[in-house]
Image: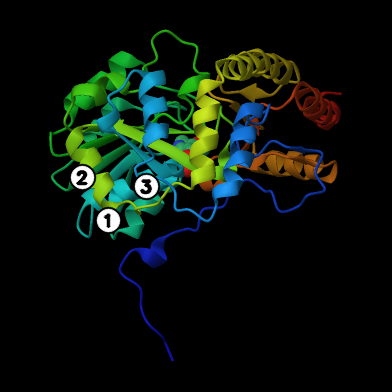
Amino acid sequence: MTGPVPRPGVLAIEPYQGGKSKDTSFIGKLSSNEAALGPSPRALEAYAQAAALVHRYPDGGAQLLREAIARHHAVELDRVVCGFGSDDILQLLARGYAGPGDEVLYSEHGFLIYPIAAHAVGATPVASKDDGYTVSVDNMLNCVGERTRLVYLANPNNPTGTYIGRDELERLHAGLPEHVVLVIDSAYAEFVDDPDYDSGQELASWAPNVVMTRTFSKIYGLAALRVGWAYGAPGIIDVLNRLRGPFNVAAPAQAAAVAALDDREFFDKARAHNTRWRDWLFQRLGGLGLSVVPSAGNFLLIDFGAPERAQAADAYLRDRGWYLRRMESYGFPGHLRLTVGTEAENRGVTDVLAAFMEPARG
Ligand SMILES: *Cc1c(COP(=O)(O)O)cnc(C)c1O
């Protein structure tokens, strides 16, 4: 008995493995780029209040949430669509624009949801070579062909933490044929301090083939609630509205996201915390003799020099209750990714890493 056979591409999907979380005996879980300070207390309050109305369907148009997004980001309401996490939107874009025979382009060390989204619709994922740890616009453009339908760019990228600046982003867009959709995944935009960074909002405001995706899972600390959004060309937003589930964002999630956006004080605190401790971790890990990729996000990619060394470090950390993210699936078997945590977590995890590095240095 063989049973029903799924559509082409489905069995080519490598199921996405998140940062370890099932084991609750950890001291520090720094494996999934979750918010160090958690969510805004006002978001939690709004979430709790929404509990009284869970027998009602949510507002399928997410009107209040889209209004809050439009207000805070100075974008047009009609060009915003919300999703069940930004993952929902990334997958819908593949469904809307690619299929068997089409190519979906992303960068070598790009976010692993992109090849999954491509396979899920029977399209062929194509990975362009990076330039070291950074996306190479030239290599990406060289991979664009007649069959290319969609280009996914995480900027900053996960797991490298690097980004391409405004000029490079514009050059990438300028080099793409008009029928190719450029998806700028700016999940970590809020963490970036550099003046030459552009979240893609500018391009998404006028170009007919650009869409920017954002999330409440990272700086807003609402990963469990699954809220993301997209802003872009009216034609693309229309496609997303047709394909999305009519009630794709739960009501308590919408309420929490609105409150999170409105709590600017907490947002500023979360941002300042990240900048401070990202710098601190970079220095401290460097001081231990580890090579760390400079990051614009809320995480750091650490190079242990060899796969065995990264595995040993991971085992050493786990034995002591610390979870980092293994990087084999991203093509970095000699690296681990560390999320910026609370002060206690940052100090704790680097103390353990210092002890791990000790014999090697002595
Ligand atoms: C975490 C992350 C997201 C966010 O996904 P959600 O589905 O919104 O939780 C999107 N893109 C990248 C590159 C990420 O690292």
Residue highlighted by disc 1: 123
> Vertically, is 4 above or below 178?
below
Alpha-carbon distance for marks 1 and 2? Answer: 9 Å
Q: Does the residue tagged 1 have its C-beta within 8 Å of any atom of ligand 1?
A: no
User: Residue 3, how many percent across, how many down?
Assistant: 41, 85
Q: Residue at x 22, y 34 (%)?
A: 142
Residue 202 in the figure: left or right of residue 300:
left
Q: Mark number for residue 149?
A: 2
Q: Quadrant of the C terminus?
A: top right
Q: Quadrant of residue 265?
A: top right
Alpha-carbon distance for marks 2 and 3? Answer: 29 Å
Along the line of sight, the residue nearer the viewer: 274 or 336 = 274
- For the residue labelled by badge 1, is the local secondary structure a helix, a strand or a loop? loop
Residue 203 in the figure: left or right of residue 42:
left
Q: Residue at x 34, y 35 (%)?
A: 230
Kind of residue at badge 3: Gly
Q: Quadrant of residue 90?
A: top left
Residue highlighted by disc 3: 60
Identity of the residue furthest to the bottom in this view: 1
Kind of residue at badge 2: Arg
Sequence-earlier tag: 2 or 3: 3
Mark 2 touching mark 3, by CB under 8 A? Answer: no
Q: Residue at x 23, y 57 (%)?
A: 99
